[in-house]
Image (cartoon, rainbow, N blue to C red):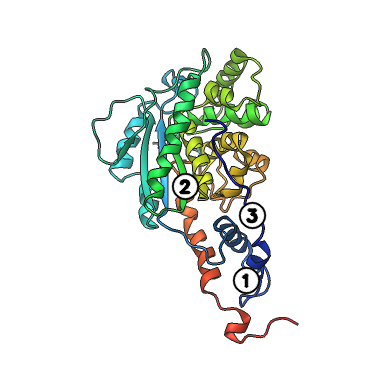
């Protein structure tokens, strides 16, 4: 599984013509700033001078975390995960609202929620287990579970591609998952856990200290994990939603789709995908910089510049949905703006 993705590095053959097309639009060079970069990125990924966004989807992967059942790191109780899944299904969560606003299809995935959902329309069941184990005392998941999660995530992409979709966002829901993301970041980037750990849904002061303590406990229990062994790192500290997201990201990049990354947890899943196959990164656009401590540093590690900084720190894919119209603007100016020649406007000497 780990080596079964073939993600071609993106060809630079069109780079110059893309840039020329952008530069010949009726505007001073670079005056559309970051929109020009985004437009060029979409053109490169699609290997086209006429970029299109088709049938946009955001997958929201939900799962529970063993450590959260004990309330060791999370201000909110674990049952909020399944309660929010029902909220997604009835259309009342932030991601539903912003998704509707921009015509983005939202798909909710039970990757490993600690709840038995009756057959609920709209819920995709790829449940690996009823939440992970508490990684302070054992590995979060077994190696076969981890491989299964990567495969399940990858398989979801097949179905989404059949809708004609070429742009896909990755969101999540899982009480306690900022902790998992912090541990993955700390281990894979070799950065002290204190610097990777933030407030999540509201751990401040003594509660934050307790969270950091619990994560240090987990690190010392597992000792020095070889950070080159991505599968081992993911199965020790991951969540089922993070592992499925990672498999889906790898498969989407393999298909040449445009990948949209959300906040801290979504970026941590990408970090794992990047560790498995670095080419994944060139298919990504980063929607926003989250308020979560560690996200800025993680983006820097990946050499990524996010589109927005709205002090959001929600997850669910909410940053992606909010940033999506900027991608539409980037495509629209490349496709619709007149060139100097077409509009008979004099270019600079
Ligand atoms: C009502 C509610 C809705 C959410 N939607 C996303 N998250 C976000 O918060 C959780 C991570 O934070 P922590 O690690 O502190 O538990 C994840 O479920 C994430 O998606 C939510 C959290 C809550 C409480
Ligand atoms: O940045 C995020 O994705 C995030 C931050 C805090 C809580 N949930 C998600």
Sequence-wise first label, 3 or 1? 3
Position above or below: 208 against 23: above
Q: Which residue is mark 1?
A: 21
Q: Nearer the viewer, residue 72 or 13?
A: 13
Q: Secondary structure at mark 1?
A: helix
> Which residue carries the number 3 mark?
11
| Nearest to N terminus: mark 2 or mark 1 | 1
Residue at the spot x=43%, y=17% of the render? 70
**In front: mark 2 or mark 3?**
3
Q: In the structure shown, which secondary structural element does the residue marked by tag 3 occupy? A: loop
Residue 332 picture location, percent across and down = 50, 68
Q: Is residue 309 left or right of residue 228?
A: left
Residue 84: image location, x then y, percent: 35, 36
Q: Give the answer, above or below, for where 286 lies relative to 120.
A: below
Report how far apart the C-alphas of labels 2 and 1 lie in the structure.
27 Å
Q: Nearer the viewer, residue 47 or 131?
A: 47
> Is tag 2's residue or tag 3's residue first in the polypeptide sequence?
3
The residue beneath circle 2 is 169
Secondary structure at badge 2 equals strand
Q: Quadrant of residue 268?
A: top right
């Amino acid at each position: 599984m780990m080596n079964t993705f073939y993600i071609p590095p993106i060809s630079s053959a069109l780079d110059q013509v893309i840039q020329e097309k952008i530069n010949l639009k009726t505007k001073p060079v670079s005056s559309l700033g970051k929109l020009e970069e985004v437009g060029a990125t979409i053109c490169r990924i699609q290997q086209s001078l006429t970029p299109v966004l088709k049938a946009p989807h955001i997958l929201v992967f939900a799962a529970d975390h063993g450590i959260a059942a004990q309330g060791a790191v999370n201000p909110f109780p674990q049952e909020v995960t399944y309660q929010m899944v029902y909220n997604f299904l009835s259309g009342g969560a932030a991601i539903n609202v912003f998704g509707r606003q921009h015509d983005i299809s939202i798909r909710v995935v039970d990757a490993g929620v600690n709840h038995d959902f009756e057959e609920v329309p709209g819920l995709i069941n790829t449940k690996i287990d009823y939440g992970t184990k508490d990684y302070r005392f054992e590995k979060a998941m077994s190696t076969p579970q981890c491989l299964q999660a990567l495969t399940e995530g990858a398989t979801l992409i097949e179905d989404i591609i059949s809708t004609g979709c070429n742009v896909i966002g990755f969101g999540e829901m899982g009480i306690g998952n900022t902790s998992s993301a912090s541990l993955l970041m700390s281990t894979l980037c070799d950065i002290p856990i204190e610097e990777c750990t933030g407030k999540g849904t509201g751990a401040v002061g003594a509660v934050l200290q307790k969270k950091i303590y619990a994560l240090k406990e987990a690190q010392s229990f597992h000792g020095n994990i070889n950070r080159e062994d991505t599968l081992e790192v993911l199965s020790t500290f991951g969540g089922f939603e993070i592992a499925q997201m990672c498999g889906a990201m790898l498969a989407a990049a393999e298909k040449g789709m445009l990948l949209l990354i959300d906040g801290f947890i979504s970026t941590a899943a990408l970090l794992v995908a990047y560790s498995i196959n670095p080419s994944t990164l060139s298919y990504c656009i980063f929607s926003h910089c989250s308020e979560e401590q560690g996200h800025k540093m993680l983006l820097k590690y990946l050499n990524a510049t996010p589109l927005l900084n709205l002090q959001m720190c929600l997850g669910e894919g909410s940053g992606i949905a909010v940033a999506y119209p900027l991608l539409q603007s980037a495509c629209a100016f490349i496709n619709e703006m007149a060139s100097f020649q077409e509009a008979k406007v004099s270019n600079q000497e």
